[in-house]
Image (tube, rainbow, N blue to C red):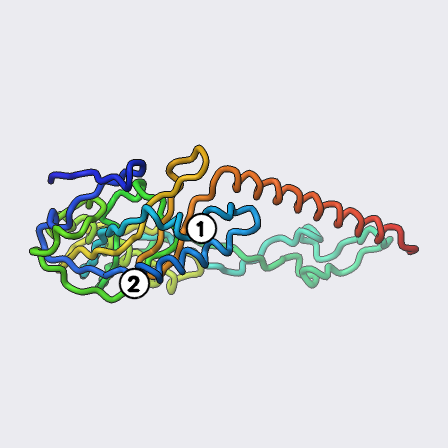
Amino acid sequence: MSTTTESISTNLSLPLVPANVIDQSLTISPPQYAGKQLIETIQTWVEKQGRHWPPELTSEVLAKNLITVYLPYWVIQVNGSGHWTASVGVDRKVPERCGTCNGKGVYTPVWANSEQRCDRCGGSGQDLVNKTFWGSQSGIVSAEVGGDVAENFDTDILKLRGKRDFSAPESRLEQTNANLYQIIRPLKTNAASSQGVAEATLKKNLADKAGTTAGKLGDYVKDLDIAYVQIDQFKARIWLYPLIIGYYSHDDEPTLLVQVDGITGEVYGEAPRGVKDKRQRDAIMYGLIALVVIAIIVVVILARPQ
């Protein structure tokens, strides 16, 4: 697969490729934020940044170098089965020698001079205590997964913030137009290569169902394992999710990251170093003030006549 790297302006580089490198049908969700609406969304975020945010860093400045790229996600449909094993614990009450009276049924309290019946065991010399008994359990479990979403890109490339809206509407992207869309370089580009992702997705769902089944057999479950996973049927497609990304410059920092989720409008902006330092100083100051207030309250309480 050939790849290209496109620079956002001259500073921030991303491994971008045209969407037509993917040799299968695609779906795409168009960005819901652009133009004036995008500026207003960033402005709302700027207004929440507090008193240390430089006034020259307006929403227009932050939006100047933004471009829209797409994140490739697998959408997996798979069903199959697997064999599970687990240790299942059951709580039971078992009799043990009473620790208070040492099994005698009577004891002498430290405040008394004579023996009396043990209140803990009622004079029986034995106390019922909880003990967990562990045993091995196993079985066959099946699961059907419809529409699970998994990343098909290197998550270390982007400092993604927030959560994507995986319920966003999507439409089919024709291959004849796919070259018009820039996407983060996908790890895999065809449905056949997604079988490992499908198996991992199925295994996770099998483990969830096996955990529920095992949980009904006792009070605790540990060392749950799924083996011999059998895929009966699976389908996979790639869904392109919009991310608006870029950078802004401030003082001697040329590449401060800006991201806007193209569906939810959630904004993440990297604060300049000077702003971070001032916020840290504020946090320390507020912490010291809180300690002083607590100390004064403690002194006042202790000074009250008893």
Residue most extreme to the top = 252
Secondary structure category for the residue under label 1: loop
Q: Earlier in the sequence, mark 1 or mark 2?
A: 2
Question: In the picture, which quadrant includes the N terminus?
Answer: top left
Quadrant in which residue 118 is drawn: bottom right
Q: Residue at left 17%, top 60%?
A: 27
Q: Residue at left 15%, top 39%?
A: 3
Residue that label 1 marks: 58
Label 1 neighbour load within 10 Å: few <14, some 14-19, many 20+: some
Picture coordinates of residue 55 (x, y %)? 51, 48
Label 2 neighbour load within 10 Å: few <14, some 14-19, many 20+: few
Q: Residue at left 45%, top 54%?
A: 133
Numbered disc total: 2
Picture coordinates of residue 301 (x, y %)? 84, 53
Numbered badge on residue 32: 2
Q: Is residue 245 above or below residue 116?
A: above
Residue most extreme to the left = 176
Q: For this view, does 242 lie left or right of residue 51?
A: left
Question: In the picture, which quadrant includes the C terminus?
Answer: bottom right
Picture coordinates of residue 222 (x, y %)? 39, 51
Picture coordinates of residue 82 (x, y %)? 22, 56
Q: Residue at left 19%, top 46%?
A: 186
Specify the amino acid type for callout 1: Thr
